[in-house]
Image (spheres, rainbow, N blue to C red):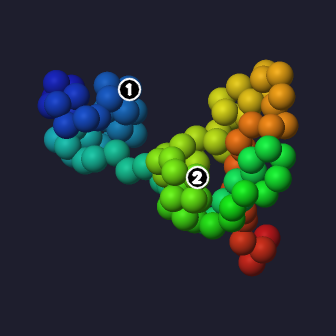
Amino acid sequence: MIETAIKNGIGARVYRQRVRAGWPRSKASTQPVQRKRYKGDYAVYKNGELAVMGTRKECAEFLGVQEDYIHWLTTPTAVKRRSKRRNHEMAISAVKLDDEDDE
């Protein structure tokens, strides 16, 4: 069944975790992995100043980049790489904006 899972784009680790969690093997090897995406707004900074605020799509269109890049800018990897740059305050950065109602 693990071969079926891999053919369906499900990693071996995910398959084993599902089986250990009590999933039927047939479901564990065929149910697609759901990725949770942040659907809120972002603030993107360029050269230390606010460049654009909006959805991932709006920010990407404004900057002429792909939507995934906007999301990537908020990841720990991007923050770490940016901090190692000489002029890190001049690099493009982004933050996720939380809704105040969620607090």
Q: Residue furthest bottom?
A: 101
The residue beneath circle 2 is: 63
Residue at left offset 69%, top offset 61%: 52
From this viewpoint, is residue 4 visible? yes
Residue placed under numbered mark 1 in the picture: 13
> Which amino acid is tagged 1?
Arg
Residue 24 falls in image quadrant: top left
Which x, y percent locates residue 19?
32, 35
Which quadrant would residue 47 be assigned to in this image?
top right
Q: Nearer the viewer, residue 42 or 49?
A: 49
Q: Residue at x 51, y 47 (%)?
A: 65
Element under label 2? helix
Left or right, 79 with respect to 32, comes to right
Q: Is residue 31 above or below residue 78?
A: below
- Observer able to see residue 20: no
Look at discs 2 and 1 and give the one toward the viewer: 2
Say if 7 sits above or below 31 in the image: above
What's under tag 2, amino acid-wise? Leu
Tell me: 28 left or right of 45: left
Residue located 68% across and 65% down the image = 53
Q: Secondary structure at mark 1?
A: helix
- Quadrant of the drawing holding the C terminus: bottom right
